[in-house]
Image (cartoon, rainbow, N blue to C red):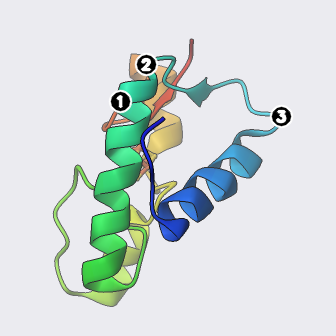
Amino acid sequence: MDQQSPHAEAIRARLEKYLEGKDFFFNPDEDIVDSIIKAMDKRHEKYGKDYCPCRRVTGDAEKDAAIECPCAYHLKEIEEEGFCHCRLFSKE
Ligand code: SF4
């Protein structure tokens, strides 16, 4: 794992907690996990929210709430494709 900012570490800790008891996990490729978390941290710096780095931020806070990680779409994506859009979460 790269050296990460305190907020990136907080994102990781929050998502690790979220994953407890789930039937999906962080992508086993640590480089992917690091780069997604790093990109999410940049979004937090810019927007003040942990928005998905793989989706467009509209500027409409109500709409954008759906893309705060874990987003409103990930469960369906993982069920249908085995991973979320960013490939942060994976079935394996
Ligand atoms: S696609 Fe994955 S990384 Fe992006 S917000 Fe959804 S769950 Fe998080």
Give the mark nearer the N terminus: 3 vs 1: 3
Label of residue 21 in the image: 3
Secondary structure found at label 3: loop
How far apart in space, not on screen, are marks 2 and 1 (Cα)? 6 Å
* Pair 3/1: label in front: 1
Q: 62 above or below 44?
A: below
In this figure, what is the number of numbered marks? Answer: 3
Q: Nearer the viewer, residue 80 or 68?
A: 68
* Number of other residues with Cα within 10 Å of mark 2, as a class: few under 14, some 14 to 19, many 20 or more: few
Instruction: Give the percent coordinates (x, y) of residue 22.
Output: 74, 32
Instruction: Give the percent coordinates (x, y) of residue 83.
Output: 43, 25
Secondary structure found at label 1: helix
Instruction: Give the percent coordinates (x, y) of residue 46.
Output: 24, 81
Which residue is pictured at 38% across the width and 85% down the height? 48
* Number of other residues with Cα within 10 Å of mark 3, as a class: few under 14, some 14 to 19, many 20 or more: few
Q: Is residue 52 visible?
A: no
How far apart in space, not on screen, are marks 3 and 2 (Cα)? 20 Å
- Residue 62 lies left or right of residue 76; in this view the side is left
Q: 27 above or below 18?
A: above
Label of residue 32 in the image: 1
Q: Quadrant of residue 64?
A: bottom left
Marks 2/1 in contact by CB < 8 Å: the verdict is: yes
Which residue is pictured at 52% across the width and 54% down the height? 70
Secondary structure found at label 2: loop
Q: 35 above or below 23?
A: below
On the image, numbered disc 2 is attached to which residue?
29
Q: 34 above or below 37?
A: above
Kind of residue indicated by mark 2: Asp
